[in-house]
Each structure stands twice: as structure tokens, then as C-alpha cells.
Image (tube, helix red, strand yellow):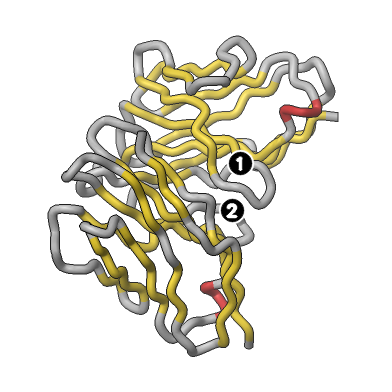
Amino acid sequence: GAVVSQHPSRVICKSGTSVKIECRSLDFQATTMFWYRQFPKQSLMLMATSNEGSKATYEQGVEKDKFLINHASLTLSTLTVTSAHPEDSSFYICSARNGQGTYGYTFGSGTRLTVV
Amino acid sequence: AQTVTQSQPEMSVQEAETVTLSCTYDTSESDYYLFWYKQPPSRQMILVIRQEAYKQQNATENRFSVNFQKAAKSFSLKISDSQLGDAAMYFCAFHQGAQKLVFGQGTRLTINP
């Protein structure tokens, strides 16, 4: 079945540094990937839609200069949290349309970011 | 804009019993897709079941089935013979056309042994 690999699963970084999270589709091509943020005991909040070869589309209220998204190939999208601060600490999840049937989605296993 | 509402923040059920999770949504479209996702403590999102709005027949996947009421815009999930491994957060989600997947607030399901 379709698999999306997300790395790292956990990362701790110092305030002011940048962190890159990778999302790879392992056995299918993903022209569109999605990045979500999830706070404890809350639902997934869509941050941006990543399209291969073009600029990402950010949701209202998401700082595009802080959350840089690159989708340079059909199997890889990256989210870079720039100049991270403690309030950026959260759980980040990527997703891709897997082409299995209509509107099938596959999710990565998520990344827990802690900024200290 | 489409919205998805899950009115039950928490539910609990005895092992082997049946539980129903509620979901309502709001849309003016007639062609769309509805999903139930499970998020266990590992936080991996797992697709439980999917329903196409144009299909009148309710989707079923083993112990999981839905009651899709299109006119009422209701999409409930029934879990039969509940097992300890069913304990998780359950999210109802809506998708239409080229738009984004919209999630409900989630329902935390506890299975009592």
C-alpha cells in the first residue's frame, strides 16, 4: 500500500535555530502534499498545501516566512521551521494523495518538535 | 466553507459492545467524500472507512460501518464488538473537489475491559 515516510519523528532544537522536516512518498508519486499542525488533544490544522514544482499555498494566519515549504520532486516535500521559538513546539504531520481510488490520502507518522 | 462537527469530545464503551460516534457536516455541494480516521496513541493517522456521497449504500469495513444520511448531512461511525485496540481519537473528515480535507474536532474513544 501507499506509504509516506516522515522524518525526524522527534526533534529538539534551541530557540532561534531552524529545523527541517522531510516527507517522502515511498511507492507513489505525490504531486500534492499537505502539512498539518496538531496541538495536544486537538484536531489537525492545515498549514499549507505543497505542489510539486510550484509555490505552496498557505492557510490564512500561517506565516509563510516562518514555515518554508519546498516540494522539489514528486516524492519529497520539506517543511522548514525558521528561527524557531517555544511557541512553535507542536506535532507536525504531512499527508499526500496516494492515488488509491478517489481522494485517497496517506499520512506520515508525524514529527514532535520541541523548541527549548 | 465546509464545516465538520463532532459533538462528542469523549466516548467510552465496554469491550465487545457497540458504540456509535456522531458527525455532522455542512456543505452546499452534492458530490463529495466523507472519511473516518483513527489516531491511536502513536499519533499515526489511519483511514478507517470512506463514503462517496453519490453512493446510497452505507460503507462497511469489517466491524466498522457508517450511517450516511445525506439529507440530514450526518455521517456516524458504528464500531461493533469493540476491542481494546480500538481506543483512539477518531476524526470525521470531508473532502470535495479540489478543496482541502476538513477535519472535525475529534472524539476520544475509551474501551473499558
**Chain under disc 1:** A
Q: What residue sits 57% from the left and 72% below the top?
A: B11
Residue B47 lies, in percent from the top left, at: 39, 57
Q: For the residue marked with disc 1, what is the amino acid?
A: Gln
Q: Quadrant of residue A75?
A: top left
Distance between mark 2 and mark 1 Cα atoms: 10 Å
Q: Do pointers 2 and 1 mark residues of a single chain?
A: no
Give whichever of B10, A95 is nearer the camera.
B10
Which label is found at residue A38?
1
Which label is found at residue A19?
none
Q: Which residue is identified by label 2?
A: B43
The vertical placement of B39 against A60, above or below, is below
Number of marks in the image?
A: 2
The vertical placement of B49 against A88, above or below, is below
Q: For the residue marked with disc 2, what is the amino acid?
A: Arg
Instruction: Check whether the beta carbons of the residues at disc 2 and disc 1 lie within 8 A of each other.
Output: yes
Residue A109 lies, in percent from the top left, at: 55, 47
The vertical placement of A111 against B71, above or below, is above
In the displayed structure image, the side of residue A13 where residue A5 appears, left or right: left
Foreground label between 2 and 1:
1
Say which quadrant the C terminus of chain A sits in. top right
